[in-house]
């Protein structure tokens, strides 16, 4: 805790003052352009990863970057997404998975989270991911299987995202874009799902999707 308190003092002295004008503007309201949905994993820092400033990202984090489909749960995810889309008017939504994901490992090995009933219940919202991996990736194991699971889960959660009424409405209007990313912790690389080739590609090679952005699955892991 002392480390956090010292960090607050450094923030106030070294970071806040140079950006005081920005924070004064943000005190009047926020206008982020992107909703960033990612895992709660402590190794991911969305602002550091994207070099974005306060006010740029509206961030939703949970175990496994999961978006329960419409009607499946009454948790905070649907409310957060609805506020970002319908009230703040974000233009883009990114779902960002990551390598070495403990939630996806638990999805593959339910016995590892059997003593965590809340976690086990939460992972049922990724049941489609588990089934896709079980049926389509029998040739993989170990880290390669985990990578495939992380990738497929991003695509499944994008499909779940499209079932939410606020998102569906904006997609129909054509002024909202969905993106699927995977962050590789050990190299700092970011891969984005590219509809033109049906694969995750380095983000620099990524072709922006249309507003419809229909997701589809690949037959192999790509990163």
Image: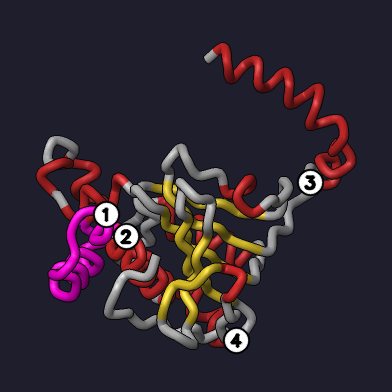
Q: Which residue is mark 4?
A: 173
Q: For the residues labelled 2 and 4, say whether their Cβ atoms are less than 8 Å apart.
A: no
* Vertical order, 117 against 71 (above or below): above
Q: Residue at x 58, y 60 (%)?
A: 35
Which badge, 1 or 3, comes first in the chain's sequence? 3
Front-most of residues 206 and 22:
206
Which badge, 3 or 2, comes first in the chain's sequence? 3
Foreground tag (2 vs 4): 2
Foreground tag (1 vs 3): 1
Q: Crowding near pointer 1: few (<14 within 10 Å), some, many (20+)?
A: few
Q: Is residue 136 visible?
A: yes
Picture quadrant of residue 17: top right
Which badge, 4 or 3, comes first in the chain's sequence? 3
Picture quadrant of residue 83: bottom right
Q: Which residue is mark 1?
A: 143
Q: For the residues labelled 2 and 1, say whether their Cβ atoms are less than 8 Å apart.
A: yes
Q: Residue at x 79, y 42 (%)?
A: 27
Which badge, 4 or 1, comes first in the chain's sequence? 1
Magenta stretch: dominant secondary structure: helix
């Amino acid at each position: 805790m002392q480390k956090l308190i010292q960090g607050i003092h450094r923030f106030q002295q070294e970071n806040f003052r140079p950006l005081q004008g920005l924070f004064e503007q943000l005190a009047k309201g926020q206008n982020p352009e992107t909703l960033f949905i990612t895992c709660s994993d402590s190794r991911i820092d969305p602002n550091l990863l994207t070099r974005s400033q306060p006010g740029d990202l509206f961030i939703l984090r949970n175990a496994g970057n999961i978006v329960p489909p419409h009607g499946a749960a009454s948790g905070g995810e649907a409310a957060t997404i609805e506020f970002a889309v319908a009230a703040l008017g974000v233009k883009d939504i990114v779902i960002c998975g990551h390598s070495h994901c403990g939630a996806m490992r638990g999805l593959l090995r339910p016995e590892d989270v059997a003593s965590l009933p809340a976690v086990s219940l939460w992972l049922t919202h990724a049941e489609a991911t588990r089934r896709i991996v079980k049926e389509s990736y029998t040739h993989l194991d170990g880290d390669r299987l985990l990578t495939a699971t992380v990738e497929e889960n991003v695509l499944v959660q994008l499909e779940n995202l499209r079932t939410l009424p606020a998102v569906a409405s904006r997609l129909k209007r054509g002024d909202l874009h969905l993106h699927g990313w995977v962050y590789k912790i050990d190299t700092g690389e970011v891969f984005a799902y590219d509809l033109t080739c049906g694969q995750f590609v380095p983000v620099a090679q990524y072709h922006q999707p249309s507003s419809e952005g229909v997701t589809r699955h690949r037959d192999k892991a790509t990163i």
